[in-house]
Image (cartoon, helix red, strand yellow):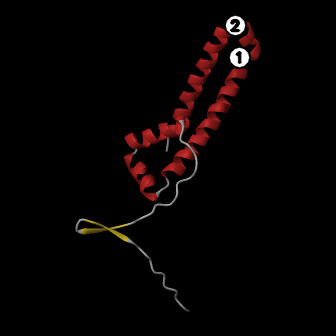
Amino acid sequence: MEREEQTMNITYEKCGDYLIPNLIPNPEPEGELRKFGLMRKSYLENYRRGIYSGLLLSGELKKHLLMIQEQAEERFDLLVEQMTKQEGVTEQLKAQDQMLWVRRINNIRVRAEEIVREEIIYTL
């Protein structure tokens, strides 16, 4: 068997008396962190420091946050849709009594967000 040797071409930058390697991290995935992604990041930073550091050092943090964000947003939308149907919060109600509709929708959104936080954001 022939063994192929791979050589690493590492460049260095001189800082004072030290040579520092020029390391280039893997590109991060495309996507913007929104509410649920930022909530997950804050939770990991403050309460699960080891997991946060491991994801950060492996370059997987943003990928993880985007995945959690997508799951949380899908769950939130589904919960809001189900709760509005179950509680009869319709466009007809909106036309009849707009303030009542706003109160009910806001209440539903708060409850759905609380469920998402407990089920997805603050779990491992």
Residue at 63 percent of width and 14 percent of height: 102
Bin the neighbour count of mark 1 within 10 Å (Cα to Cα): few under 14, some 14-19, many 20 and up: some
Which image quarter holds the N terminus?
A: bottom right
Q: Position of residue 3 (x, y in %)?
A: 52, 88
Residue at 56 percent of width and 33 percent of height: 116
Q: Say which mark, if any, is on residue 97.
A: 2
> In the current view of this chain or complex, which residue is farthest to the bottom?
1
- For the residue labelled by badge 1, is the local secondary structure a helix, a strand or a loop? loop
As drawn, is 53 to the left or to the right of 40? left
111 up-or-down from 11: above or below: above
Tell me whether the residue at label 1 lies in contact with that at label 2, contact meaning CB atoms closer than 8 angstroms.
no
Q: Position of residue 52 (x, y in %)?
A: 42, 48
Residue at 39 percent of width and 52 percent of height: 53
Bin the neighbour count of mark 2 within 10 Å (Cα to Cα): few under 14, some 14-19, many 20 and up: few
As drawn, is 99 to the left or to the right of 19? right
From the image, tell me which residue sits under label 1. 89
- For the residue labelled by badge 2, is the local secondary structure a helix, a strand or a loop? loop
